[in-house]
């Protein structure tokens, strides 16, 4: 069959997610995976989810099994607003769009705002799947560097002197893959730049609740409201995947009024609405008031896991690499002290039976091949001990 010309040009050069490909290796019996950013199923609240599921199918079966509103269940949207209010994000239910995970929210928003060739700025490194959505939207992706205070917004300010941009994508809290949090000063500068230069900020916040201390950083949405008196340039997205269960495939976006209806039209064409059953389950679960304790449980477990992995890496690999100790989230981001190709190293570690994610996949340009990401979310302490020992042997 002649396939030339049958594929849309936008899909020809889009790469498959390296992380999804690496998951194939993690399923092999002898392999220990420190690769995927997958929540630990040992921490799922199966009891609460069971109760909520029973409530959904016995107390509101018509809404659980019937078509629903594109924007999402009205009650769920209200409960999402209450959840967001605890994070400092003030919004009404009419501003919320329920999506099939925050990944779909990113895709819908990109399709609604990006014309082919529009400039969108990301940090180096950044979330791989966000790069995929930007590529599919045919954006012109530009990047600025990051450091221990997150995206170097001052570098963005310099770029804006000569470049018109459509938007900025950023994970401000415990970012994937770096685990870094954007500083307070840079948060304020970023929202001011958005207003001054009239671009949109996509604030992706899947990890903000997974902090290892009691310090809570204000969201960009909150900073914008406090500093500018509005949130016109902020699109806030989050998910239930990291704090409840990813199999529910539920996330949400809080959108400016001009954008909500346009995104709803795209969602109508994509899937009509997010799973009605999943929405009913989460709606009931939130009504049980079990989520705060569930989040506390996850935070404590990930903090312990992160400390264990950081200690092992320092002990076994500290002569070769440098890293910042995780302060939240699910990842440890490391860099070799000397030039070293982590992707080539992966071939050696697979021989030893351990998989990680080479850092180069998280860069839109100028990849730092001396970097790599380890996830501590799913591995047990014993598995982490063995995995790090195998990493050392592979060197």
Image: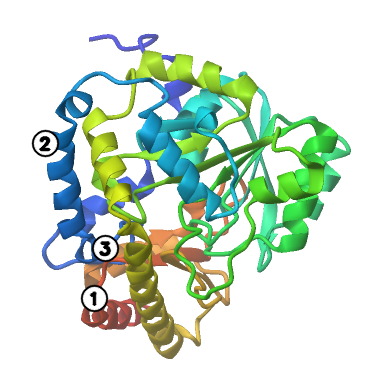
CB of mark 2 within 8 Å of CB of mark 3?
Answer: no
Question: Is residue 272 placed above or below 129 in the rendered structure?
Answer: above
Nearer the observer: mark 2 or 1; the answer is: 2
Answer whether residue 127 is visible to the viewer in this image.
Answer: no
Q: Position of residue 69 (x, y in %)?
A: 36, 20
Label 2 SS: helix
Report the colour scheme. rainbow
Q: CA distance from mark 1 to mark 3?
A: 10 Å
Q: Position of residue 149 (x, y in %)?
A: 68, 65
Question: Is residue 237 placed above or below 296 in the rendered structure?
Answer: above
- The residue carrying mark 3 is 40
Mark 1 vs 3, N-terminal side: 3
Q: Residue pushed farthest front?
A: 59
Question: Is residue 325 placed above or below 32 in the rendered structure?
Answer: below
Quarter in which the C terminus is drawn: bottom left
Q: Position of residue 191 (x, y in %)?
A: 75, 45
Q: Position of residue 218 (x, y in %)?
A: 64, 58
**Around disc 1, counting alpha carbons within 10 Å, would you say few (fewer than 14), some (14 to 19), or many (20 or more)?**
some
**Around disc 2, counting alpha carbons within 10 Å, would you say few (fewer than 14), some (14 to 19), or many (20 or more)?**
few
Nearer the observer: mark 1 or 3; the answer is: 3
Which one is in front, 377 or 301? 301
Mark 2 vs 1, N-terminal side: 2
Q: CA distance from mark 2 to mark 1?
A: 37 Å
Answer whether residue 332 is visible to the viewer in this image.
Answer: yes
Q: Which mark is residue 58?
A: 2
Residue 86 located left or right of residue 78: right
Question: Is residue 49 placed above or below 54 in the rendered structure?
Answer: below
Which one is in front, 322 or 44? 44
- The residue carrying mark 1 is 380
């Amino acid at each position: 069959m002649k396939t030339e010309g049958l594929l849309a040009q936008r899909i020809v050069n889009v790469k498959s997610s390296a992380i999804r490909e690496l998951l194939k290796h993690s399923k092999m019996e002898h392999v220990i995976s420190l690769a995927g950013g997958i929540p630990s199923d040992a921490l799922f609240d199966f009891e609460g989810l069971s109760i909520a599921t029973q409530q959904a199918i016995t107390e509101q079966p018509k809404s659980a099994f019937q078509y629903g509103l594109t924007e999402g269940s009205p009650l769920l949207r209200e409960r999402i607003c209450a959840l967001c209010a605890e994070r400092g994000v003030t919004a009404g239910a009419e501003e919320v769009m329920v999506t099939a995970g925050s990944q779909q929210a990113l895709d819908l928003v990109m399709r609604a705002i990006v014309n082919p060739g529009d400039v969108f700025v990301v940090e180096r490194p950044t979330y791989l799947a966000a790069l995929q959505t930007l590529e599919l939207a045919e954006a012109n992706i530009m990047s600025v560097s990051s450091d221990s205070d997150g995206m170097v917004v001052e570098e963005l300010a310099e770029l804006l002197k000569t470049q018109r941009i459509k938007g900025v994508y950023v994970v401000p809290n415990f970012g994937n893959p770096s685990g870094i949090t954007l500083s307070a000063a840079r948060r304020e500068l970023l929202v001011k730049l958005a207003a001054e230069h009239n671009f949109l900020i996509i604030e992706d916040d899947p990890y903000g609740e997974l902090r290892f201390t009691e310090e809570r950083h204000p969201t960009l949405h909150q900073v914008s409201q406090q500093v500018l008196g509005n949130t016109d340039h902020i699109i806030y997205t989050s998910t239930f995947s990291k704090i409840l269960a990813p199999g529910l495939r539920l996330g949400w976006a809080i959108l400016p009024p001009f954008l909500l209806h346009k995104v709803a039209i795209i969602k109508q064409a994509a899937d009509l609405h997010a799973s009605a059953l999943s929405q009913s389950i989460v709606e009931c679960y939130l009504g049980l008031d079990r989520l705060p304790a569930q989040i506390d449980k996850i935070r404590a477990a990930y903090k312990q896991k992160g400390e264990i992995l950081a200690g092992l890496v320092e002990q076994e690999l500290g002569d070769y690499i440098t890293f910042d100790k995780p302060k939240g989230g699910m990842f440890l981001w490391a860099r070799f002290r000397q030039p070293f190709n982590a992707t080539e190293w992966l071939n050696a570690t697979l021989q030893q039976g351990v998989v990680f994610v080479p850092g180069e996949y998280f860069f839109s340009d100028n990849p730092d091949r001396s970097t790599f990401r380890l996830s501590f979310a799913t591995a047990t302490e014993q598995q982490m001990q063995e995995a790090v020992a195998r990493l050392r042997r592979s060197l």
